[in-house]
Image (tube, rainbow, N blue to C red):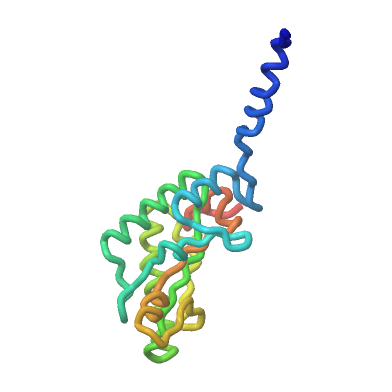
Amino acid sequence: MMRHPLSLLLPLFALAACQTVQPQPQQAGFTPQQVATLQQQGFEPAGDDWQFGMADRLLFGTDESTLIPEQQAAISRISRVLVAVDIHGARVEGHTDSTGSASYNEALSARRAQAVADALVVGGMARQAMRVVGMGARVPVESNHLASGRRENRRVVIIVSPADASDPVPPANASLP
């Protein structure tokens, strides 16, 4: 019995169709390249936004608000990569554990957020596109009853929204039309 040559090719075409790479879905407000870059840099989706600081937390010591050189270099590198794909700003949230007074924790969390925002600016993000917020101890990710939980709560989270993924921010001294 002789087979038709085309009948031998049909299974190969079917197999090739199964292996076709599907394009990555575009998240609202971000290009596929921006989504891929955010993922490569360790950001995770959070609604319409992307957050850095969940799996790769930016943690601080007790009563500390200074980045260690390795953190500063890593944040500056992330900033350069994001600016290269037209992400020019971010919301930077500082957090604390529950030790200390509420007013002290508010100020400490703001200093932590500012330290990270400054490193993002060194990497090329526009200072005027930064939204720096001190959250104090209001949004813990772990229980403050254990030392390990308090450690996880002393953090900064970088949040990139669709508004950050647009045209470059004009310089602060640029005149408006």
Q: Residue at x 34, y 55 (%)?
A: 74
Residue lying farthest left?
A: 69
| Image coords of residue 110 (percent x, y) | 42, 76
Residue lying farthest top?
A: 2
Residue lying farthest front?
A: 1
| Image coords of residue 108 (percent x, y) | 38, 80
* Quadrant into which the N terminus falls: top right
Q: Residue at x 52, y 53 (%)?
A: 169
| Image coords of residue 133 (percent x, y) | 48, 73
Compared to 53, does 142 lie above or below? below
Q: Residue at x 38, y 72 (%)?
A: 112
| Image coords of residue 25 (percent x, y) | 64, 46
Q: Quadrant of residue 65?
A: bottom left
* Image mark count: 0
Compared to 115, does 100 lie above or below? below
Compared to 108, does 169 lie above or below? above
Q: Quadrant of residue 104?
A: bottom left
Q: Quadrant of residue 48?
A: bottom right
Q: Residue at x 40, y 72 (%)?
A: 155
Position of residue 168 in the picture relative to residue 3 (left or right): left
Position of residue 46 in the picture relative to residue 8 (left or right): left
Comparing 154 with 133, the one in front is: 154
